[in-house]
Image (tube, helix red, strand yellow):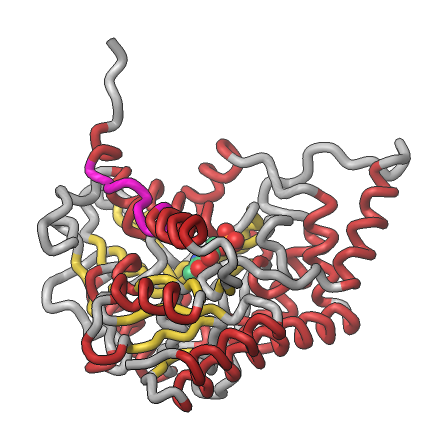
Amino acid sequence: MATINDNYLKLAGSYLFAEIGRRVAAFKEANPQADIIRLGIGDVTQPLPAACIEAMHKAVDELSQAETFRGYGPEQGYSFLTDAIIENNYTKRGISIDSDEIFVSDGSKSDCGNIQEIFGLDNKVAITDPVYPVYLDTNVMAGRTGTLQADGHFEGVTYLPCDASNNFAPELPKDHVDMIYLCCPNNPTGTTLSRAELKKWVDYARENQSVILFDAAYAAYITEEDVPRSIYEIEGAKDVAIEFRSFSKTAGFTGTRCGYTIIPKTVKGRAADGTLVEFNKLWNRRHTTKFNGTAYIVQRGAAAIYTPEGQQQVKELVGYYMENARIIREGLEAAGITAYGGVNAPYIWLKTPNGMSSWDFFDKLLTEVNIVGTPGAGFGPCGEGYFRLTAFGDRENTLRAVERIKTKLRF
Ligand code: PLP
């Protein structure tokens, strides 16, 4: 009989959103009149920028004519898109990225999840806690961890706790680690690392010959000057860091699907025979073997965000969500709740009042004010005692939700 990859059995079921769905459904059944507002979603709600729509319509028309039809494209992405990304997100910030150091994909979930395939199974993995679950789960699937322990940690993984006590900036690990996942701005905490904090990690990686896997999916939301938009703004990072970016939250591409990964040729790992090998080469091999390119229409839409109109529209879109973030953050503070994030990210991470567990707070918010959020414990053991609200809702619902929290929630 065929055998299975037993590592998959180490993973708990995707409990978080299933459990939220179950509790909301039960509440709705018992209270059919309740006007529930969802501030738990990680998906955007506003339409694509007009510049993207126009570019995609045009691309569809091109595909309708034999002269302008396109079939398979370059797996790494069309140069009209990669050139625009490099120019706008890197060259303009003083970072030099070569055209063969960028790989366009169908979004950064795939890239963040797949990147571990080009690393040896004996690498020691460090992951911030709490964080986007994809980094951990994909390493569990690959067999780079032991089993899940009673404390919610996987054996063999170095967790880097991030909470209010360290200002959500993880401390360097005491033991040596090889692969370091950093998510900045962070999902779920909405917090960021300053230039000085990030430099500590780049220095650590250089000294320890580790690789930083830097997820900058929310880079477009950064407002403060001291927060790097790219890890390559830190000197020396090009030797030790791989960066992931996405059009999902930047321009509403969660359903349209487009992202990219930067792998400088200077980032290297050791082969079994001791030779140094560029991770770029391995990823190129993997990408061209397992991926057949992002749709031409989608890449045209993505490239349109770099036109002057596109830039303006994206700024407005991000500004819309960030205004929601401000409304939520200030509303929580007015209600006496301590809140983090929401300044450089569309996530607000609140401390549950009176030491409540994050699931107890979920129930309280649902039953007392009919608002759905996400319990922090779902993002890692250090998320316990915290709760995530997102700024991706529409303005009206965001205002209504905050008003309810301010006037009806009692502690
Ligand atoms: N990285 C982080 C931190 C995210 O929160 C998300 C999506 O929620 C992604 C990556 C995935 O983005 P994409 O839609 O590009 O796959």
Q: How many marks?
A: 0
Up the image or down, 49 lies above or below 280; here it is below
Residue that protrudes farthest toward the top in the picture: 1
- What's the residue at 78%, 63% (across, down)? 50
The quarter of the image holding the C terminus is bottom left
Q: Is 14 contained in the magenta span?
A: yes
Residue drawn where x is 61% and y is 49% of the image: 255
* Front residue (pair 241, 329): 329
**264 or 355, which is in the foreground?**
355
The percent position of residue 291, horizontal first and vertical second, equals 53, 36
Left-right relation of 382 to 31 = left
On the picture, is 184 further left or further right than 126? right
Q: Horizontally, is 241 left or right of 326 in the view? A: left
15 or 200: nearer the viewer: 15
Q: Is residue 263 visible?
A: no
The residue range painted magenta reads: 10-18
